[in-house]
Amino acid sequence: MAKLSDVPLESEVRMYFAEVMTFEDKLSRDEIMRCIKNEQWQAFRKGLKGLSTQAKLARLRTWKSNHSGRCASVVVQNYINALKRGGQIK
């Protein structure tokens, strides 16, 4: 399992995800389920399939910078948590 620091990323991308991964709020299942139903997010998420972890993280950063609001933060954090659970980052 790679640490985020082991994934070859531009330093600004790494700093961004270090901030995102310290998301203080505990995500509730209800909030996650409500936010992930967004059709744009689902299309985006499906487009991440098969990409390297580095590419996924870079695209997640772009997604987050182009979408504001709580749900944008929730879906990105939830995806990062899934990468952790899947052993792609720690």
Image (spheres, rainbow, N blue to C red):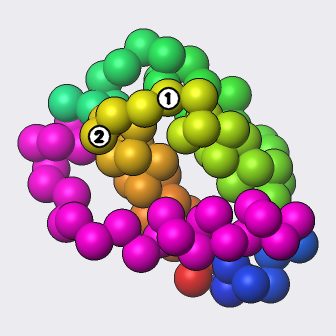
- Image quarter where the C terminus lies is bottom right
Residue 72 drawn at (x, y percent) = 41, 37
Name the residue located 28 percent from the left edge and 71 percent from the top edge.
Answer: 24
Q: Name the residue under label 1.
A: 67
Whole-Å distance between the Cαs marked 1 and 2?
A: 9 Å
- Image quarter where the N terminus lies is bottom right
- Say above or below: 66 vs 31: above
Q: Type of residue at label 1?
A: His
Q: Is residue 40 left or right of residue 33?
A: right
Res 30 label: none
Q: Judge whether residue 88 is colored magenta.
A: no
* Secondary-structure class at tag 2: helix
State the residue in front, 63 or 35.
63
Q: Quadrant of residue 60?
A: top right
Name the residue located 49 percent from the left edge and 16 percent from the top edge.
Answer: 40
Q: Quadrant of residue 12?
A: bottom right
Res 70 label: 2
Q: Type of residue at label 2?
A: Arg
Q: Can residue 68 be seen in this view?
A: yes
Which stretch is magenta? Answer: 10-33
Q: In this view, does 40 lie to the left or right of 78?
A: right
Name the residue located 42 percent from the left edge and 14 percent from the top edge.
Answer: 39
Instruction: Categorize mark 1 by other alpha carbons within 10 Å: few (<14), some (14-19), many (20+).
Output: few
Residue 57 drawn at (x, y percent) = 70, 54
